[in-house]
Amino acid sequence: MGKHEPIIEFADVTFKYKSQQQPTLKNINLKIFPGEKVLIAGQSGSGKSTLAHCLNALIPCSYAGDMSGVLRVCGGEPRQLGVFGMSKRVGTVLQDTDGQFIALTVGEDLAFALENECTPKEEMVQKVSEVAGKLELTEFLGSAPGALSGGQKQRVSLGGVMTCDVKILLFDEPLANLDPATGKRTIALIDELMQKEDLTVIIIEHRLEDVLYRKVDRIVLMDDGMIIADKTPDKLLSSDILKSHGIREPLYIAALKAAGAQISPEDGPSSIDTMDLSAHKDKVKEWYHQADKNKEQEKGDTLLSLSHLQFSYNDTRQIIKDVSFDIHSGEMVALVGKNGAGKSTIASLICGFLRPDEGVISWKGRDLSDLSIKERGEIIGYCMQSPNQMISRPMIYEEVALGLTVRGVPENEIKERVYEVLRICGLYPYRNWPVSALSFGQKKRVSIASILVMDPDLIILDEPTAGQDYAHYTEIMEFLKDLRNQLGVTILMITHDMHLMLEYTDRTLVLADGELLMDGRPWDVLTNDEVCDRAYLKRTSLYDLAVKCGIDDPGDFAATFIEHEKRERGAIEVK
Amino acid sequence: MARILSYEKKNTFVHRLSGFTKLLFLILWCFAGAMTFETRILVVMLLIGAGVYYVADIKWKQVSSVFIAIMIFMTLNLVAIFFFAPYQGCEIYDSRTAICHLFGNYYLTKEQLFYEFNVCIKYFTVIPSVFVFLTTTDPSELASSLNGVGVPYSIAYSVEIALRYIPDVQDEYTRIKNAQQARGIEMSAKGSLLKRIKNTSLIIFPLIFSSMEKIEVVSNAMELRGFGKKPKRTWYSKRPLTSIDLYVISFITLFCIATMIITFADGNRFFNPFR
């Protein structure tokens, strides 16, 4: 195969899932050449995951359907080679790093594919140590994959497919479950590997800005089963195509466009670090000075107050160290920090699942310590990450009514309250449906509705948007915002998502190693280098834009832009 | 955190043995323990079992709840034997030495007591060996050992995956239980037993669904990395047998044969002190 022969070639490929009426992929024509790094972007339902499944032959081997056209990968046809045949050519790294660990130790997990190939043990040990060396995992070979940090886990899943000497690496939403700093490192790692090895990389991701942290050769934009654009990042970012197909532009690009700058591919807009801003500087400054400044919001009464909280599981390691903060009525607050920083522990302490070793949690000035989990549940609702972890009844009505039924509320009152909550959540038309007939986003609403029905003053949500694309993310977050604005519910969210924090919350609590590192406005957090470093957050590109344009107060610039975007979105809704 | 009956990494004599050796030991040991009613052999096995349990450095916390459950079951079993067959011992040992009259037709006999003592000790010879096996054998080594003794690798691997997910499922259970409790579902001792059983289903349902989600991911990940491609596979964690393994295997084989010979030398399985 010569250098100019494509390693992947779709020729007029159409695919229709057995269960669906319309094809999910429509006449796809795409060539990818050896050594290229290609980003495939698109909102959910655009067909980007289906396209990926064609490459590793899960389609049509595991998900049945009708396929026409010709697809060649490394000179072979996936549908003839099957999933096993393709596993030697295309290494797939799945979104859920925890879920894809199969074995009990890192070494075994790296060896898994070799074991299935019947590789003799000596050869296997040698290959595993070679790959572990490349990925700096040698000292962890005997550890359980679950005990590693997020970044190390990503290395292990990468190593697991690299032991097969694959030519193509396929990443299916690699950033979805990672904290921002780890995501950034993963993108850098992919880049380093491409420089050392002879690899072609395909990344499926809708978080454009994070992937563009390192150079990408081409972006393929998909929508409705078709390829909308296949261009270099510089060209694509200069157009308005991304936004109109449901993909969020990098924040600095959105800010430049808001300031009225005409971006051209020659400016090199794919990276804020190297972008030429000389033509746009003055426009940005001018926009900043005339833009409406955001106003400090008035704080409501103190609802929940944590003071000097200490917690450890068994005296060995202090999980929570002297944490104090207040939550005010009507606020929307984000609790952020890297995996294992103690975010979930704080939520468990507030809900009463765990008891603090020292310190007081009080509600409107009253100590909560003598209230049971059930009693706290009536004032503080807790919503788990996946609706599947919450939903325990087959019918929507029953599920939402559950909290009231077990409390012995009279039947007619239950009906009234459930219907009201279903109306608020936009689920009223489905009230007699089985839960299984709903989409993921609707199920999420059901799980929130079943908490809301108990009329709590505060709702704690664990990763409300994890693994969601921009459209679903917006749907869930706008819904929460409406709840806050219409019902006055106070919301505390545990999250990894920096956009969520910037766009939707009034205040951010940053945890690192069990300590409260910062309690401030989101833009102040995301423009503070030291805090970002320690808490594994990522400084927002709005900061870099402001600095490059010579604006004195980058934090205020970020705040101004975010406020501007919120107003814009509000204006669209009113229309 | 110590988890019930799950593998814990340590460096003892028992941990160092290969999984294959331990599996073979367990099978032959349980076979010998089940076949023989030769009290002297059972006592020897009891002592060896206790010794191995001690050497393996097992924490009481790891096994206590299962041990208590087995003890309850054993007591029920012994009482039931007495009520349904009060003279089983007399039949076996062909003699009857009454100690006292209890009620109705029931007499307490020396033979019955001795028979039930034997049943009891059999429990105690088998229990520690099972505990030792489960807590000292790395699940992946267990899988390779099962495969080594002829179990198809897909089944052997399913066993490994099941063992590996037990701690995850335990954690998930706690998380779901907490969230459901916050919704007002009573899981503490306050509610009636029937209600608690009913409420448990409210946790099991979401637990199954969230586990199904995970199973789909894992099975895809396994397939994408070629699991099931070939009729055979090799094992990264398989340890070659050392000379100590060979000694242990020879010992248990000889022990098992000797047990059988001694047990069946006089034509029946029972040691009879009443003759």
Image (cartoon, rainbow, N blue to C red):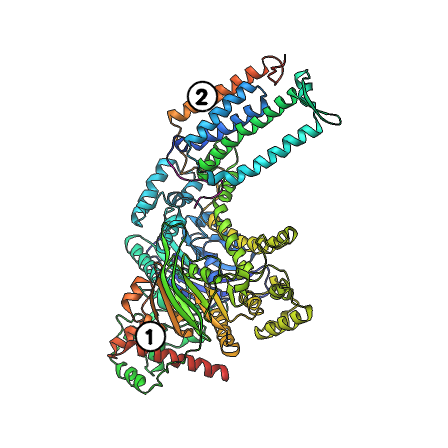
Q: Residue at x 60, y 71 (%)?
A: A427
The percent coordinates of residue A99 (x first, y second) are 46, 52
Image quarter (top left, top right, bottom left or bottom right) of the C terminus of chain B: top right
Q: Can marks 1 and 2 be said to lie on one chain? A: no
Q: Is residue A235 left or right of residue B96?
A: left
Query: On the image, numbered disc 1 is attached to which residue?
Result: A252
Q: Chain for mark 2? A: B
Q: Residues within 10 Å of mark 2 (few under 14, many from 20)?
A: few
The one nearer the camera, B71 or A91, is: B71
Q: Chain for mark 1? A: A
The percent coordinates of residue A573 (x first, y second) are 49, 81
Per the image, label 2 sits on a secondary structure element best described as: helix
Q: Residues within 10 Å of mark 1 (few under 14, many from 20)?
A: many
In the rendered view, would you say A3 is above or below A525? above
Q: Residue at x 34, y 75 (%)?
A: A253
Residue A301: assigned label: none
Query: On the image, numbered disc 2 is attached to which residue?
Result: B250
